[in-house]
Amino acid sequence: MVQTLQAKNVTLRNLIDDFGLRLVQDNQFFREWQDDLPSITDSEKQFLDKVKEGYINLINYPPLLEKPIQIAILGPILFLGGFYLPPFQIRAEESIEIIAEDEGTIIRGQLDVLILKEQFWVMAIESKRFSFSMEAGLAQLLAYMLANPHPTKPGFGLIVTGGTFVFVKLVKDAVAQYAISNEFAIRNQGNELYDVFSILKRIGNL
């Protein structure tokens, strides 16, 4: 009997059992968020400082929902990184479907934001409300990333939960494997949006 799941209800256990997904804890597997990161200009830092100020203003007027996060935090960062310009394409609420090899499980859902580069999925982005943890969006994002129609290349994702950011890498070889970055938080001292922006630029330049 075929089981159909909505992506928002998928758990890591579903992905492990039905799609063979494995977590890689080798630090060398996901170096893209650590190595060869591009520098950030003073004007870019000033822009990101304003984004942080906007976030601080947002949390003073709860609840902080997904759409305000996309408009006030995610949208400006993608704009600054040039992701709205060629060769990139932005698609919102893109429908996806993945089917287990034995066709016993089908997962359907909609991505919040999808960034394509020459028809290749550069980045899948899942944003969650402020009250959700990174874990709440991880299984959902990985389900979307498993639907990437270009399995020969690594896929990258980003989970945004209010003021925190986590990058994800997925490789679909004989076994689907993933790893996650450290968590970056706007609330931390300094401005960790600098790190988020630099990693986004690095992935966009791959």
Image (tube, grey):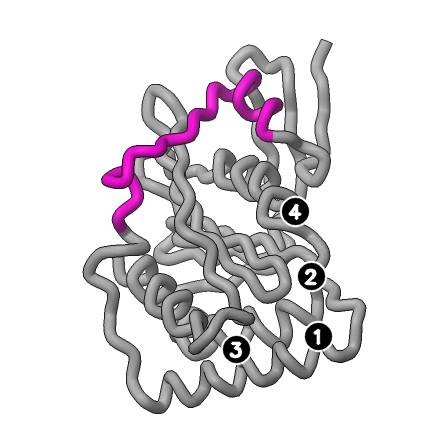
Q: Which residue type does callout 1 highlight?
A: Ile
- Report the span colored magenta: 12-31
Separation of marks 1 and 4 at Cα, in angstroms: 26 Å
Label 4 environment density (alpha carbons within 10 Å; few <14, some 14–19, many ≥20): some
123 vs 161, left or right, is: left
Left or right for 3, reference 113: right
Q: Is residue 6 above or below residue 1?
A: below
Q: Which mark is residue 113?
A: none
In the rendered image, residue 26 lying in the magenta stretch gets the answer yes
| Callout 2 amino acid | Phe
Badge 2: residue crowd in 10 Å (few <14, some 14–19, many ≥20): some
Residue 59 - label: 1
Between 87 and 156, the one lying in front of the other is: 156
**Residue in the picture at 60% in, 43% down:** 135
Q: Residue furthest left?
A: 36
Write down the residue under mark 3.
Answer: 76
The type of residue carrying mark 4 is Gln
Q: Label 4 vs label 3: CA separation?
A: 22 Å
Secondary structure beneath disc 1? helix
Vertically, is 35 above or below 175? below
Q: Nearer the viewer, mark 1 or mark 3?
A: 1
Report the residue at 43% width, 70% height from top.
Answer: 192
Q: Which residue is mark 2?
A: 130
Q: For the residues carrying marks 4 and 3, which lies nearer the camera in this image? A: 3
Task: Assess whether residue 137 is covered by the magenta stretch.
Answer: no
Mark 1 in CB contact with mark 2 (< 8 angstroms): yes
Please, is residue 91 above or below residue 134 in the view?
below
Looking at the image, residue 143 sits to the left or right of residue 151; the answer is: right
Distance, label 3 to label 2, CA atoms, is: 18 Å
Query: Label 3 amino acid?
Result: Pro
* Number of numbered labels in the structure image: 4
Compare marks 1 and 4 and give the one earlier in the sequence: 1
